[in-house]
Image: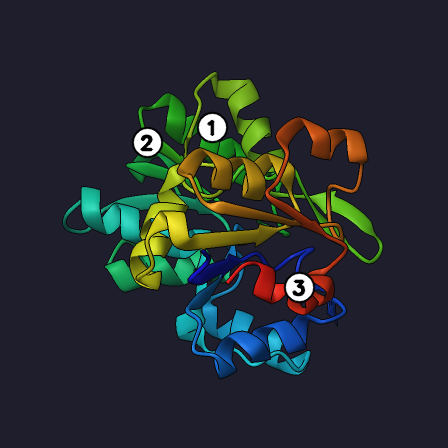
Amino acid sequence: MVKGFLIDLDGTLYLGNQPVRGSREFVDFLKENNIPFLFLTNNSTRTPEQVAEKLEKMGIQAHPSKIYTSANTLADYLREHYKGCHNAYVIGEDGVLRELENLGWRIVKDYKEAEFVIVGLDREVTYEKLKQAVLAIQRGATFIACNRDSSFPTPEGFLPGAGAIVNAITTVVGVEPLVLGKPNEYIIRYAVKRLGVPLENTAIVGDRLDTDIALGKKMGMVTILVLTGVNKNEEEIKEIKPDFVFEDVGELWKNIYRLL
């Protein structure tokens, strides 16, 4: 029996700036029936406030407290494992920068000062940024990635994700990062703690077999694949076998009582 939901955003509730069919109705149903949920995303570029604003513009009711990003996971992990202020070289956008600033960490521009290299999606990444990152890691800086998604869906097609940047760095340094987002356990453990629902009673809803569904299976959750984002191939779906497959969240909403 499902008692709470972790709901992916990109490719699941929306594509670009367009809501997926049924996304408003699905979220409204959860709210009206007091079913716990969080919007869960590997996207680290925006703050929860910025994500909520984007959802509101699409007519999807959202509050920042309902948003949990890989940048939030980063903050929770660093808070738990590293006390005090540290120096970080960052390839990333507002979501990561804001979380580090809230922790009191110092963002540095010179690789020689960096204790950590933290990488998320950065749509203004440059050769200079990559250079600083690889030099810092070669000097012993701890390498952490918010996620390793190689791409993300948009109405125009798939675009390079944080994983493309991470791979460029690992190719040079030969060092694998600690990856905090899906399909790794960290993001789920912290999110479920915030959700307040046992893992076995939590459903993860997403469009990616290699992250959303693989992670849900690994963690013993109910897994729900929607076919509006990355994975639409029947052969791929047969390999990982989600518990439920729906065309979109609209079809999920219409069949919600099968889960509750």
Which x, y percent locates residue 5? 48, 60
Quick check: 22 left or right of 122? right
Residue shown at the point (19%, 43%) measured from the top left? 82
Give the numbered dot on residue 240: none
Quadrant for the N terminus in the image: bottom left
Give the numbered dot on residue 134: 1
Q: In this view, does 57 lie above or below 225?
A: below
Mark 1, Cα crowd under 10 Å, few <14 / some 14-19 / many 20+, is many
Q: Is mark 1 on a helix, strand or loop?
A: helix
Spatial CA span between label 2 and label 3: 45 Å
Q: What residue type is labelled 3?
A: Asn
Of discs 1 and 2, which sits in the foreground?
2
Disc 1 or 2, which lies upstream in sequence?
1
Q: What residue type is labelled 1?
A: Val
Which x, y percent locates residue 63? 46, 78
Residue shown at the point (58%, 66%) measured from the top left? 257
Give the numbered dot on residue 255: 3
Q: Is mark 2 on a helix, strand or loop?
A: strand
Quick check: 120 left or right of 20? left
Q: What residue type is labelled 2?
A: Thr
Residue found at the far top of this picture: 174
Spatial CA span between label 3 and label 1: 49 Å
Which x, y percent locates residue 74? 36, 49
Disc 1 + disc 2, Cβ < 8 Å: no
Residue shown at the point (29%, 52%) measured from the top left? 76
Mark 3, Cα crowd under 10 Å, few <14 / some 14-19 / many 20+, is few
Disc 2 or 3, which lies upstream in sequence?
2
Per the image, the residue denoted by label 2 is 142
Mark 2, Cα crowd under 10 Å, few <14 / some 14-19 / many 20+, is some
Which x, y percent locates residue 221? 45, 45
Q: Which of 97 and 244 is in front in this view?
A: 244
Disc 2 + disc 3, Cβ < 8 Å: no
